[in-house]
Image: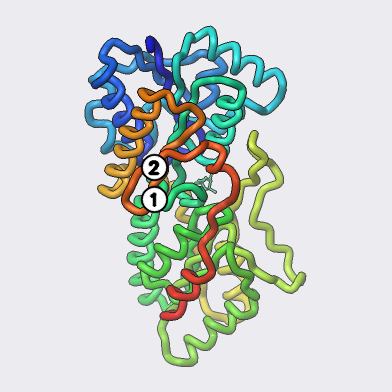
Amino acid sequence: MKRIGILTGGGDAPGLNGVIKGAYLRIKKDLPDVEIIGLLEGWRGLIEKKYIILKDDDVKEIHKEGGTILGSSRTNPYKNEDTVKKTHQSFKELELDALIAIGGEDTLGAANKLAKDGFPVVGAPKTIDNDLNVTDYTFGFNTAVNIAMEAIDRLHTTAKSHRRVMVVEIMGRHAGWITLWSGIAGGAHMVLLPEEVTKITEVAEFVKKRKEKGELYTMIAVSEGAILDTGGASNFVFEEAKTDEFGHVRLGGIAKQLAKYIEETTGIESRYVVLGHIQRGGSPTAFDRILSLRFGINVGELVLKKEWGKMVALRGTEIVAVPLEEAVQELKVVPQKLIKELKSIL
Ligand code: F6P
């Protein structure tokens, strides 16, 4: 093997750099003369042949840094015939003997198609949302949960001081993992998830009852994709009409509208906080550093063994190899049993 490419696609997640480092060092150990190139800004880097040649110094300390040293984008190489043609052409022109694609459902879906088209591709799963079916956990999730939990911890004191309702909007798209984890860990009084339908009237009732019982404030953790039954009486909008190249809508706005509704119906002063991209920024936790390095080492081994069309995944405490195809089959939402278990203490 002479030349290997690595790319990071989709929303960034703390730990991406750990995978790059793990893969680089593992491959270089066996193949010291191989050139490892970092394709810039996800699939765009492959299509436009924009890359850097990675050196030992580039990866030295990077597992401690958030984001990705390669940049990322939501570019879809399989967007249309033209982009597919360009992707195939660039792959050949760059003379890549292997490509490591690090990303979520979309990036791995494209990697799967490329592997099916006969290209030597392997993958590593990433997303703060933890919604990939193949793996028990993705790196970035643990960091996001800790950031959201700390934010909720802090919001308690100000909400209590002002006797307010505080509604905290948490990322995760159509899976409630980050919200359930951080909400329960951070001591939220109510947790609203995309996996359940909650009547908005029930939320207001809950807040009122807490006040009647003498509780000074209420903390509500709400997923950006939570499902609220508004009884058709309201014009709540939680998503933008515009979609990205993979057809995803941009979620957001649920906390603002929920806080307004609560204040209007209960008369209790309410505020909202959108945690947003803070959940994805900054350095990874120790758990995510180790998981990402392990994914990197093991995806490097897949390359050395030429196990194309596969990706690494965490099962229990083991890192295993599974077909890329499996990554994109089904969204891993929070199981009802787990929701019931954790919510039983609310
Ligand atoms: O998939 C990760 C994620 O952070 C989601 O939780 C969120 O809905 C989305 O990405 C935000 O995407 P963007 O960074 O493109 O606004």
Q: Quadrant of residue 115?
A: top right
Q: How is the image coloured?
A: rainbow
Mark 2 vs 1, N-terminal side: 1
- Dot 1, how many residues are within 10 Å of its Cα: few (below 14), some (14-19), or many (20+)? few
Quarter of the figure that contains the N terminus: top left
Residue depicted at 60% across the width and 68% down the height: 196
Residue tagged by mark 2?
320
Q: Is residue 80 found left or right of 174 in the rendered image? A: right
Which amino acid type is shown beneath numbered disc 1? Arg
Residue in the picture at 32% in, 46% down: 288
Placement of 33 over or under 153, stated as above or below: above
Q: Amino acid at mark 2?
A: Val
Q: Which residue in the structure is indicated by mark 1?
A: 315
The percent coordinates of residue 151 (x first, y second) are 37, 60
The kind of secondary structure element at disc 1 is strand
Relative depth, front residue between 74 and 116: 116
